[in-house]
Structure formats: C-alpha cells, structure tokens
Image (cartoon, rainbow, N blue to C red):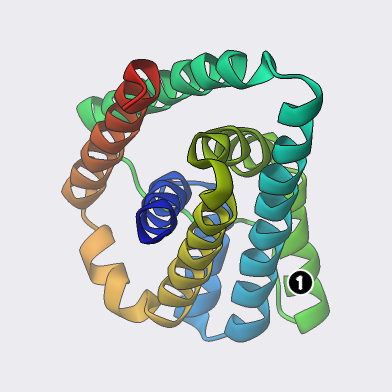
Amino acid sequence: MFHAASAGFYLGFSLILAIGAQNAFVLRQGLRRAHVLPVVLTCAISDAVLIALGVGGFSVMIDLIPWIAPALRFGGAAFLIWYGARSFHAMWRGGEALRAADTGAGSLHAALLTCLALTWLNPHVYLDTVLLIGSIATQYGENARWFGAGAVTSSFVFFFSLGFGARLLAPIFARPRAWQVLDGVIGLVMWAIAAKLLTGT
C-alpha cells in the first residue's frame, strides 16, 4: 500500500515538474500574491478528477479487455522514453526560462478562467493524468487506488508549494542552470520508470 502510494506520488510529481504554461501561470500568481489559494486549488482538484478518471476507468477497462494492459504498459514506456528524451534535450540546449502566461488575471474570475483553460485545454494533461497514470496504476492491482491517491497528493503538494513558495523559488529558477539540473533529474526519473515498465519489475 505504502509502496504504491509513494510510487504514485513520485511519478505524479515528476510529471508535473515539467515547465509549462500552467506552472508558469501559478508561479506568476504566487509572485504577485494574487488569488493564490483559488488558483492552486483549481489546478490540484482538476488533476485529482483526471487521475481518478484514469485509475477508476482503467480498472474497469482491464476486466472487459484483458489484452489492453500489456499494450498500455509498452505504450506508457514509449511515452516515458520520449518524455525523458525531451527533458534531456532541454537540459542540453539550456537557456530555458519560466515565462508567465501572457493572459492577464487581475480579477478572481479572470484568474480562474485562465487557470481552467491552461489545465483542461492542454492535451498533455490527458496523456499524463488519464492515460499514463491510469495505465501504470494497473500494475499495482488492488493497490491501484493508493497509487492514484499518491499521484493526487503530489498535485496538491506541488501546486501549493509553487503558489505559496513562489517568492522563495524565483531567485533560484531565474538562473538557466537551475532549469538544466531540473530537466536532467526529470529525464532520469522518466527513463527509470520506463525501464521498470519494460522489465516488469
């Protein structure tokens, strides 16, 4: 149970660390101290809904279509290999900087609409939360729900840390070298998970 939950937490945290418009927007709101709590809650709850759909839906699907599990296992490994390679490429290229979304969010209404758009209109969020986390959760059998709970926890920890800790993180990640290190760590984690999927360990 603990192993499944911790695996879900680390996978979810690694996936969500990637530089993107949603994270940039949360960081920007945190730096401005503007509607931080509603924004981070919107991001975390959205992730929780998507992860629950992935974990719950896949358990039902496996019962109906037994051969889909190995297909998704290798498909997930391929996606992780690509994801890791992209991170290593970003590390090698360097010069990455976290740029806040250009969309203004002076009011709470505008902030939440922007946050929802950056979350639900991003196709990668469905690959990460519904497909990838859902497919990997099937490897944990009866503990799949704990795996999903770990992934949900990682979303809450990440978004609250990013939103409320933005002023502490900004000086560190203003340096391109910090992003290179982060991208390298993400690449290693993604490839390690892919190797476990391929070897079945």
- Which quadrant is home to the N terminus? bottom left
In the image, 154: left or right of 104? left
Residue at image position (52%, 71%) is 156
Which quarter of the figure is the C terminus placed in? top left
**At numbered mark 1, what does the secondary structure look like: helix, strand or loop?**
helix
Residue 87 or 198: which is nearer the viewer?
A: 198
Provide residue 185's location: percent of width, then percent of height: 23, 41
What residue do we see at 73% from left, 59% from top?
Answer: 49
Residue 42 visible (yes or no): yes
Q: Look at label 1 and name its amino acid.
A: Leu
Asked if 42 appears above or below 2 in the picture, the reply is below
Number of on-image labels: 1
Tell me residue 98's x, y (percent).
41, 52
Is residue 118 among the parts visible in the rendering? no
User: In which quadrant of the rendered view does residue 173 lie?
Assistant: bottom left
Which quadrant would residue 38 be assigned to in this image? bottom right
Q: Residue at x 61, y 22 (%)?
A: 69
* Picture quadrant where residue 72 is located: top right
From the viewer's perspective, is 110 left or right of 190?
Answer: right
Camera-side residue: 169 or 174? Answer: 169
* x and y percentages locating residue 168 in the rendered image: 28, 78
The x and y percentages for residue 15 are 45, 44
**Above or below: residue 68 compared with residue 125:** above
Is disc 1 surrounded by few (<14), some (14 to 19) or many (20+) residues within 10 Å?
some
Look at 56% across and 16% down and name the residue there. 70
Residue indicated by mark 1: 112
